[in-house]
Image (spheres, helix red, strand yellow):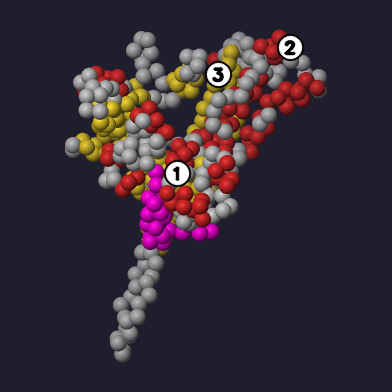
Amino acid sequence: MLNALNPVADINSYIEYFNNHGYAIRPELFYDKQLLDTIRLDEKNFVFYRLANTTPIQNNAAKLQIRRWAPLQAHTVPLDEGVPPFSDKGSMEKYEINTFSYGRYMEFTDRVNFEVIDPVIAHYTKEYSIVAMETLDLLARDALVTVASAFYAGQVANFQSLTLDCKPSLEDLRVIALSMKKQLVKPRNGNRYHVIGTPDFYFDMIEDSLVQKYMTINQTTKGFYDDMGPIPPMFGLEFYETMHVDNSGEFHATIGGTEDDYLLVARFNTSTSEMEYGTADATTYKVAKVDGQGNPDNYVYDSRTGQKASYIPNLKHWDLDAYNTAVGDGNGDWYELKVDRVFVLGADCLTRTEIAGHGNAKMYVKALGSAGVLDPIDQRQSIGFKIDSVGFGSTRTEAVAIYYCVPSQLNADFN
């Protein structure tokens, strides 16, 4: 994965090593800082950046430029005697991928000592190794989303037309694969296109009529019924599961002549006993968080302790309370209708570039006093990571499709 970060993979092994080689850790400190596993996604969910073909650029280059030449077509028109034919023409399209740097850090006081292997420091060093991988995966996923063709469950016209009835369907995925095949998009491996979906997606797909028929005919798929996971390969599609996706009702569109970000919302109308659907616009209802003094608050808080955790610049959230106040009529509240984004990918769907030798994440440890006059009496220290230069892009945009659907369990509160 990230070779520079592998040495922090096992906290307990390092603590044991230092204890057995004469490095003392005061028991009262150690036992007060016993750690449980962090509740987060593990490495196997970060699947998008692994799809990329890596093409480094030289140190003196600012961006990666990739060229694709237009194909020449055969024809069967005979030559006229003594008359040269018209010349064919060369045509080329180019793709440019820029690189950027990314990083995060965390400060500690002098109460946490780097001279011993402190479990807190070891834990957050390991955590940053996963955050670095997650950052790369987010960049890869965002690059795919930017260029993807959109397909909607039930073949509805657009995102805002999605309803609870738009459940995932293998027939829809077959249409997407057929579209790629017609555009001469090669499968990712062998003769199969890759489908990356969520557990909610596969929860419904196992009951799809075509999948059921395949299971009935093929007598060797019992294992897929025993385990909760992706369905077996079929119809030229190979299925993978991840939880690192953006399942939300947010989308960008032009509605009523206004281009904006919107949120798909729904409610059960208690008066008519029917489901209703609508949209909230970001200009009015997507707002920045503020602290008790009205200042921007860009921290994500731990839901269990209420303490600050991740800092995310320009953090905003959808204020559905304000939406319900503005449009409420006493017939039920509006809630976000969550939409699943399933990726269907062919060959050349993603390219990763980096300045040669600078693509891996690097950990930084700044001990007490390392800030010089900014830390005059050794009170501050920090750890962090930085990815010097990395960029993602697609060199075959036709090889990227997103299938938007509404799995039943993703919106179970409406059922």
Which residue matches tag 2? 27
Which residue matches tag 3? 107
What crowding class fits label 3: few (fewer than 14 Cα within 10 Å), some (14-19), or many (20 or more)?
few
Does dot 2 land on a helix, a strand or a loop? helix
Q: In the image, what residue type sits under mark 2?
A: Pro
Query: Which-is-in-front pick, marks 2 and 3?
Result: 2
Q: Which residues are magenta?
A: 168-191
Which residue matches tag 1? 207
In this rendering, does residue 100 appear at all?
A: no
Q: Quadrant of residue 145?
A: top left
Q: In the image, what residue type sits under mark 1?
A: Glu
Relative vertical location of residue 315 with respect to residue 183 in this rendering, above or below? above
14 relative position to 377: left or right = right
Does dot 3 land on a helix, a strand or a loop? strand
Image coords of residue 232 (percent x, y): 53, 49
Q: Determine the residue positioned at 51% across, 30% down.
A: 103
